[in-house]
C-alpha cells in the first residue's frame, strides 16, 4: 500500500491530499486460508450468428460432435456453418459455492469469427484445474457493443468477439471446504510484511484477551480457536476481521516508462545530492520541392525531397536536490523543470547513487 501518493504524469504534477493511515481492518489486508476463488474454463459453441461465424475445421468438428451426441451423424467436411463460432468460456467460482447458484461467464472467440452479436452459447461444461466439472454455462451472449460496415467503411464499438453471459453458469458441484470443527485458522496477509504480521497477532490477542494468535512468518498468522468458539468459527471470524491493524508499508517509487507515469510514496526520502540533467534535441524536417524541365525539353517533372537536420544540446546546471518529506522532494524536482520521462531517468540515477531512500519498481 502506498500512502499519501504523489502522481506525476505527462507534464502534470498532482499532489494528493496528505492522509495518515494508522490502521486498516484485518479483512482488508488478509484472508483465511482456503477461502478463495477458483477459475473454470470450457470449450463451447455460439450459434445464431448472422454470417459472422468461423470458417475453420475446429468449429465444424465441434458441431459434428454435438450433433452426434444428439443422434445425428454428419461429417465435419460436409458442414458449412457461418452462423456458429467456437469459443472459450471462462468463469470465476466464488468461495463456498452452493449447487444451484448462478455466476457470470465470459465468452471469447478462438477462431476467425468477426462478431458474436446476437449469438447464443450452447450448454458448455466448465472444469476446474482438477478436470472436474463444477458448472454448466448456457445462454444469450451480450457483447455490449456492435460492429458494422460496408463499401470499404466500418464502425465498431467495444470488442465484438468477446462477450458475457450474465448469470449464465449454474454451479453443479461444491468445493469441499468446511469451517466446522476447526481447531486453528490460518490468516494469510495479501502483502507479506514482518511488522504487519506481528501487529495482526497482537491485535487478535488483545481482542480475545489471551495468546491465541501467533505470527509464524511474514505472511501467515495462525489463530487457535478458543474453546468457547468451537463449532462457531464464523462468529469468531466476524469479530476478528474487524480488528484494526497498524500497517507499515515500505517506501516505494513506482514508474511506468511506457506512459511516463511516476508514483512516489509518502515515506520516500532523498539524501542531499547534486544533479545535472541535459538533453540533446534532434529535429529533422523534410520539404518536398517540384523540379520542372525547360519547355519543349524531353525531361519529366519530378518531386525532389530536401531534408534539413539540426541538433541542439541544452545547457545543464548542477542543482542540489534533497528532501525529508514528500512535499520537499516534489518541490525540489519541480524546480528543475523536468518532464516525467526525464524524471524517470533521474530517479534511476538517484537509486544507483544510493541517494533515493526507497524501493524503485518499474512496471
Image (cartoon, rainbow, N blue to C red):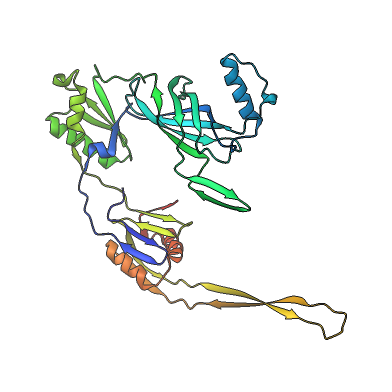
Q: Where is 198 relative to 59, above or below?
A: below
Decide which of 356, 34 is in the foreground and name it. Answer: 34
Q: Residue at x 53, y 40 (%)?
A: 161
Tell me which corner region of the image, top left, top right, bottom left or bottom right, holds residue 348.
bottom left
Q: Relative to 97, is 51 on the left or the right?
A: right
Residue 279 pos. (x, y %) = 51, 72
**Numbered label tally:** 0
Tell me which corner region of the image, top left, top right, bottom left or bottom right, holds residue 31.
top left
Decide which of 357, 295 is in the foreground and name it. Answer: 295
Q: Residue at x 36, y 57 (%)?
A: 263
Q: Residue at x 58, y 49 (%)?
A: 149
Decide which of 276, 43 is in the foreground and name it. Answer: 43
Decide which of 221, 84 is in the foreground and name it. Answer: 84
Q: Relative to 233, is 338 on the left or the right?
A: right
Q: Relative to 177, is 309 on the left or the right?
A: right
Residue 230 pos. (x, y %) = 18, 18
Amino acid at each position: 500500500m502506498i500512502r499519501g501518493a504523489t502522481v506525476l504524469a505527462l507534464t502534470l504534477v498532482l499532489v494528493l491530499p496528505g492522509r495518515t493511515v494508522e490502521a486498516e481492518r484485518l479483512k482488508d489486508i488478509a484472508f483465511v486460508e482456503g477461502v478463495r476463488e477458483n477459475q473454470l474454463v470450457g470449450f463451447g459453441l455460439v450459434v445464431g450468428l448472422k454470417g459472422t461465424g468461423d470458417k475453420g475445421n475446429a468449429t465444424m468438428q465441434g458441431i459434428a460432435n454435438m450433433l452426434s451426441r444428439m443422434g445425428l451423424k454428419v461429417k465435419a467436411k460436409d458442414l458449412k456453418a457461418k452462423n456458429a463460432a467456437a469459443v472459450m468460456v471462462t468463469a470465476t467460482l466464488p468461495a463456498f459455492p452452493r449447487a444451484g447458484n448462478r455466476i457470470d461467464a465470459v465468452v471469447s472467440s478462438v477462431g476467425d469469427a468477426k462478431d458474436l452479436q446476437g449469438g447464443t452459447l450452447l450448454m458448455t461444461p466448465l472444469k476446474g484445474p482438477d478436470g472436474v466439472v463444477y458448472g454448466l454455462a448456457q445462454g444469450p451472449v451480450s457483447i455490449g457493443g456492435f460492429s458494422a460496415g460496408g463499401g470499404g467503411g466500418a464502425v465498431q464499438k467495444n470488442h465484438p468477439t468477446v462477450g458475457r453471459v450474465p448469470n449464465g453458469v449454474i454451479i453443479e458441484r461444491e468445493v469441499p471446504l468446511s469451517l466446522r470443527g476447526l481447531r486453528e485458522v490460518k490468516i494469510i496477509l495479501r502483502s507479506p510484511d514482518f511488522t504487519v504480521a506481528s501487529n495482526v497477532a497482537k491485535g487478535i490477542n488483545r481482542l480475545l484477551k489471551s495468546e491465541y494468535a501467533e505470527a509464524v512468518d511474514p505472511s501467515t498468522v495462525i489463530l487457535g480457536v478458543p474453546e468457547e468458539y468451537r463449532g462457531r468459527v464464523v462468529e469468531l471470524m466476524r469479530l476478528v476481521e474487524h480488528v484494526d491493524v497498524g500497517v507499515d508499508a515500505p517506501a516505494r517509487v513506482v514508474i511506468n516508462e511506457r506512459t511516463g507515469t511516476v508514483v512516489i510514496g509518502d515515506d520516500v526520502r532523498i539524501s542531499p545530492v547534486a544533479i545535472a540533467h541535459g538533453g540533446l534535441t534532434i529535429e529533422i524536417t523534410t520539404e518536398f520541392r517540384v523540379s520542372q524541365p525547360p519547355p519543349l525539353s524531353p525531361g519529366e517533372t519530378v518531386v525532389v525531397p530536401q531534408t534539413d537536420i539540426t541538433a541542439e544540446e541544452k545547457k545543464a546546471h548542477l542543482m542540489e536536490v534533497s528532501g525529508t518529506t514528500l512535499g520537499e522532494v516534489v518541490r525540489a524536482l519541480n524546480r528543475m523543470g523536468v518532464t516525467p520521462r526525464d524524471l524517470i531517468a533521474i530517479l534511476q540515477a538517484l537509486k544507483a547513487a544510493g541517494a533515493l531512500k526507497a524501493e524503485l519498481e518499474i512496471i
